[in-house]
């Protein structure tokens, strides 16, 4: 099977069907401007830190590289593209001014890696790896998204976990720091390395996802990103995007059925049933109260009559019963029977009178009025 990556595993966890459509069926997603913009910024920062020997490129050289390698795919208009091109220049200027004074050559920039787990391979790219003075590694990944990263996000960022696993395997050195650099705010957000148990869980996740893919498990999974770029292939959205006439011509059982009308009729009747249930309850209360006040067992209308019947039910506080019967060694017996079995035990007088009296005190009596409808057969 094809190598897995953080992106493909995230896609599979998000929706196995989307993974299949993208990575097996080869369907192409729509180009997104924010991906092009992020790649343009990454390219400029790779140029800045990718020099073989000092000094680093000047700010003008970085900005020129940014302009010359600008990716314009996915923008909705020339105005939007100009806006983000200018915004990117501002972010690069701020980044350069903040970081150039302590510039040092990194250990790796845009370094590809591959981890081998037997039949399963895991691949990806490091944005940047620094080797610190104490000989440990620092992972840095540039992010151009809007959201600021909080502690919980950093502590659970799966991408950083995978990167630590890869870095320590590749260089055989411990990772001591992992950072997501938020370009929009020009702020590095750092977190501690993952403990060994968490790295093992990451390994297990890679293998488990690979096993699911090999087993052909590609069920659609609805999530907050729905609908994706392929709604016509999704059982949750296909009907909403499909031509009903084409669909129904293939399903002879439903020829002539206006399924959209069926849907709306169903929802309307469900709403009416709910409303009628509330009205019915209110009317039942009026009939019941009328019978009680007038001391009637049956109330008559023009065509129908309603008989009022009291349904008396006895229940017990189960926990209180347990506290009484358990010391007597009888709880297991009562536990296997229902309320009627307990009443039978009391009726047969197998219990000490004091215990029986205690149980009697635990009775909870409820009386519910039941209405029986019948035809009014009176002249």
Image: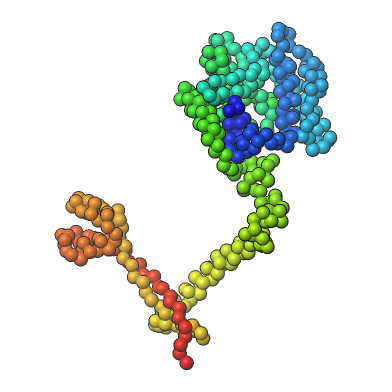
Q: Is residue 44 above or below residue 242?
A: above
The residue drawn where x is 67% and y is 56% is 248
> Which color scheme did the rendering employ for the protein?
rainbow
Q: How many marks?
A: 0
Give how far across and how far down residue 19 sits, in percent: 61, 35
Q: Nearer the viewer, residue 372 or 156?
A: 372
Q: Is residue 107 above or below residue 326?
A: above
Q: Is residue 176 above or below residue 35?
A: above
The residue drawn where x is 66% and y is 48% is 238
Q: Residue furthest bottom?
A: 379
Give how far across and how far down residue 272 sits, in percent: 58, 67
Q: Is residue 235 above or below residue 200?
A: below
Residue 141 appears left or right of 358 = right
Q: Nearer the viewer, residue 131 or 375?
A: 375
Give how far across and how far down residue 239 sits, in percent: 66, 51
Which quadrant of the figure has residue 140? top right
Which quadrant of the figure has residue 28? top right
Asked whether residue 264 appears in the rendered view, the answer is no
The residue drawn where x is 73% and y is 8% is 55
Q: Residue furthest top?
A: 53
* Quadrant location of the N terminus in the rendered image: top right
Residue 195 appears left or right of 67 = left
Residue 6 appears left or right of 186 = left
The residue drawn where x is 59% and y is 33% is 10
Give how far across and how far down residue 283 sits, in percent: 50, 74
Asked whether residue 108 appears in the rendered view, the answer is yes
Q: Nearer the viewer, residue 231 or 157?
A: 231
């Amino acid at each position: 099977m094809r190598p897995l990556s953080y992106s493909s595993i995230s896609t599979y966890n998000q929706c196995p069907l989307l993974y299949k459509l993208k990575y097996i069926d080869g369907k192409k997603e729509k180009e997104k401007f924010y991906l092009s913009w992020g790649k343009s910024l990454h390219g400029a920062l790779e140029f800045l830190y990718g020099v073989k020997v000092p000094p680093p490129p000047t700010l003008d050289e970085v900005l020129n590289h940014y302009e010359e390698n600008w990716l314009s795919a996915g923008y909705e208009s020339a105005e939007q593209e100009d806006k983000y091109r200018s915004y990117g220049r501002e972010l690069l200027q701020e980044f350069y001014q903040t970081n150039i004074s302590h510039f040092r050559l990194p250990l790796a920039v845009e370094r590809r890696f591959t981890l081998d787990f037997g039949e399963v391979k895991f691949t990806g790219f490091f944005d940047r790896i620094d080797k610190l003075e104490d000989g440990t590694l620092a992972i840095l990944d540039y992010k151009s998204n809007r959201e600021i990263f909080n502690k919980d996000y950093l502590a659970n960022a799966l991408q950083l976990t995978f990167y630590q696993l890869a870095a320590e395997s590749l260089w055989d050195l411990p990772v001591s720091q992992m950072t997501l650099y938020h370009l929009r705010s020009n702020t590095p957000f750092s977190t501690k390395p993952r403990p060994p148990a968490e790295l093992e869980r990451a390994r297990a996740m890679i293998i488990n996802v690979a096993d699911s893919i090999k087993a052909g498990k590609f069920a659609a999974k609805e999530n907050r990103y729905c609908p994706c770029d392929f709604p016509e292939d999704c059982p949750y959205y296909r009907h909403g995007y499909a031509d009903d006439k084409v669909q129904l011509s293939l399903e002879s059982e439903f020829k002539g059925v206006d399924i959209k009308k069926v849907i709306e009729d169903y929802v309307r009747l469900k709403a009416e049933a709910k409303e009628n249930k509330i009205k019915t309850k209110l009317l039942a209360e009026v009939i019941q109260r009328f019978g009680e006040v007038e001391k009637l067992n049956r109330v008559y209308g023009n065509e129908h009559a309603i008989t009022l019947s009291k349904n008396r039910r006895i229940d017990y506080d189960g926990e209180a019963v347990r506290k009484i019967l358990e010391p007597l060694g009888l709880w297991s017996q009562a536990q296997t029977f229902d309320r009627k079995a307990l009443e039978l035990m009391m009726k047969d007088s197998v219990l000490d009178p004091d215990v029986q009296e205690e149980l009697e005190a635990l009775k909870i009596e409820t009386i519910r009025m039941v209405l029986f409808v019948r035809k009014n057969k009176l002249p």
